Amino acid sequence: MPREFARHLRVGAELLRVLNELLQDEVKDPRLRDVRVSEVDLSGDLGVARVYYSTLDPAADTAPIDAGLKNAAAFMRTRIAREIQLRRVPELRFAHDLRAEQGQRISALLDKSAAAVPGDPSTED
């Protein structure tokens, strides 16, 4: 009988919580000041965690953030090992979450198309 929530989903949710706490309270790198983890996707064997992050400014350059996360990865894995009881702490691989930027782009396109529709009652006063 399958469980309601798979283990990798529960561990991913816990990793998300711990990583956000670390970024907010303990990581001192100024490049990571406005970074938040938006999603954690774990492999089936829990060996690799794909960590998606976002920034307050979706148009910000991500190269320094990537370097900062790469430098802080060992520290974060050590802290994760203290917080979560796992046989093996997953390798952290970081990727920029583009959903916010794509959402802004779609919203701008929708606004532009709504303004271009003649006789639209929502744009008339």
Image (spheres, rainbow, N blue to C red):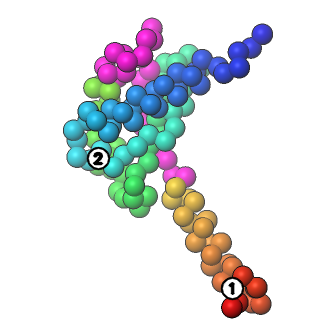
Q: Amino acid at mark 2?
A: Arg
Can residue 55 be seen from the camera position used here?
Answer: yes
**Which residue is disc 1 drawn over?**
123
For mark 1, give the secondary structure: loop
Dividing the picture into quarters, in which one does residue 66 lie?
top left
Q: Is residue 42 left or right of residue 74?
A: right
Q: Position of residue 34 (x, y in %)?
A: 33, 49
The structure residue drawn at horizontal position 44% and vertical position 43%, both measured from the top left corner, is: 53
Q: Position of residue 93 (x, y in %)?
A: 43, 32
Dividing the picture into quarters, in which one does residue 43 lie?
top right
**Which residue is disc 2 drawn over?**
33
Q: CA distance from mark 1 to mark 2?
A: 40 Å
Image quarter in which the C terminus is found: bottom right
Q: Is residue 36 left or right of residue 65?
A: right
Residue 27: which numbered mark, if any? none
As rendered, which of 94 and 32 lies closer to the eye? 32
The structure residue drawn at horizontal position 40% and vertical position 51%, both measured from the top left corner, is: 55
Number of labelled discs? 2
Image quarter in which the N terminus is found: top right
Q: Which residues are magenta?
A: 77-99
Q: Residues within 10 Å of mark 1 (few under 14, many from 20)?
A: few
Dividing the picture into quarters, in which one does residue 27 lie?
top left
For mark 2, give the secondary structure: loop
Q: Position of residue 49 (x, y in %)?
A: 48, 27
As rendered, which of 94 and 8 lies closer to the eye? 8
